[in-house]
Amino acid sequence: DQFCGKMKNDLLVTYYALFDQVRWLHMDSKGGVERDETLRRTSLQAGALDIMRNPLTLTQNRRGDLFISEFFGMQVRVLRPKGAGCKRQTASRATIHRHVDIAGASLGHHIYVFGGKNSDLDASQTSDVHSFDIVQDKWTTLDAKMP
């Protein structure tokens, strides 16, 4: 069971610009929020080794691994569940070319990263499209360009 059943029927929400973290909303049986807390390892106060930089989209694979794309952080952060009875590894990270100001979307078991700039100092835009397969844990540069 993913996250040892602790997140069943709950909701994860990214806080993009102000607090840069993922919030875990514990839902009651009527769909109301029973409790709201920061997901472990998504902020310095919640045990992260470094800060998240504008988390955008998130998705989960069948094993329960969470994949969180960071708009300004130029990476996809991978959180792997660990707990009593889960026997899972700790958090790891998957990255691709360093881009800032990217757009992101998730569909099925892929996270797509569109465009952006090569660095904070480089004003030129890139039209690259990358895909991260959360099952294979692998990046691919797609043979497609943004207009």
Image: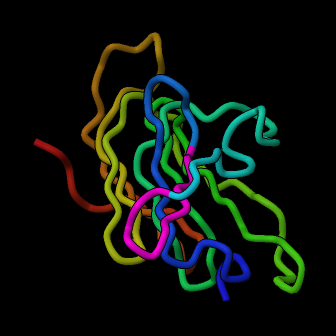
User: How far across and down, in percent of the image, does residue 58 sit?
Assistant: 46, 57
User: How far across and down, in percent of the image, does residue 37 sit?
Assistant: 63, 47
Image point (38%, 68%), residue name: 31
Image point (47%, 45%), residue name: 14
User: How far across and down, in percent of the image, does residue 125 sit?
Assistant: 28, 26
Indicate the colouring scheme. Answer: rainbow
Q: Is residue 40 left or right of residue 65?
A: right
Quadrant of res 131 = bottom left
Quadrant, the C terminus: top left
Quadrant, the N terminus: bottom right
* 131 in the magenta segment: no
Image point (48%, 29%), residue name: 72
Asked whether 14 or 72 is in front, the reply is 14
Asked whether 142 or 29 is in front, the reply is 29
Name, please, the residue furthest toward the top.
Answer: 121
Quadrant of res 93 = bottom right
* 29 in the magenta segment: yes
State whether residue 139 is above or below residue 100: below
Asked whether 83 or 104 is in front, the reply is 83
Query: Which residues are the magenta region?
Result: 22-33
Asked whether 27 or 46 is in front, the reply is 27
User: How far across and down, in percent of the image, does residue 140 sit?
Assistant: 44, 64
